[in-house]
Amino acid sequence: MQYVLPEHSEALQKWHAAQDKISKPTLDEQELIEIGQVVMDSLKHELNVKIIYWVNGSFDEVIGVVDRVDQYEKYIKVRTDDDVLKIMVDCLITVKRI
């Protein structure tokens, strides 16, 4: 019979969770240019876009309008129906017109 101490059980759970995390991808220059064009179109014309971005080891998705682009601190603000999100530019995966 095997016994597992609570401390070991917790460590195993954390280890399994860490194995499921996805490392932050890096985009090439062409992908960044395409994302930048769609972001600026959304900002200028208040067009809805679908954004997929990386956060803490997984991907998340949001639909909204780009409300602000901060080139100095390298983030965008996205306005949804009920919230405003701040997304770092280096976490963007795709931005598509909808």
Image (spheres, rainbow, N blue to C red):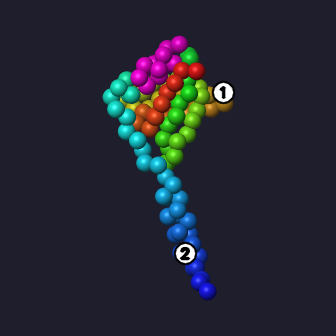
Please tell me which residue is depicted at 56% across the width and 65% down the height of the picture: 13
Q: Amino acid at mark 1?
A: Asp
| Residue for point 33% across, 28% down | 29
Give the mark, 1 or 2, whose residue is nearer the N terminus. 2
From this viewpoint, which residue is outermost toward the right?
A: 82
Q: Residue furthest top?
A: 45
Q: Relative to residue 15, is residue 60 depicted above or below?
A: above
Q: Which mark is residue 38?
A: none
Tell me the chief SS of the magenta region: helix
Q: Nearer the viewer, residue 64 or 16?
A: 16
The secondary element bearing badge 2 is classed as: helix
Q: Residue furthest left?
A: 29
Quick one: 73 or 60, which is closer to the camera? 60
58 vs 33, left or right, is: right
**x%, y% of residue 70?**
42, 27
Numbered mark located on residue 7 in the image? 2
Magenta residues?
Answer: 34-45
Above or below residue 21? Residue 36 is above
Residue of label 1 = 81
State yes or no: residue 30 in magenta. Answer: no
Q: Is residue 79 visible?
A: no
Residue projecting furthest to the front: 1
Q: Nearer the viewer, residue 85 or 62?
A: 62
Instruction: Tell me the crowding category of disc 2: few under 14, some 14 to 19, or many 20 or more residues within 10 angstroms, Cα based.
Output: few
Residue 48: image x %, image y %? 58, 21
Image quadrant where residue 84 sits: top right
| Type of the residue with mark 2 | Glu
- Residue 10 position, x and y percent, is 56, 69
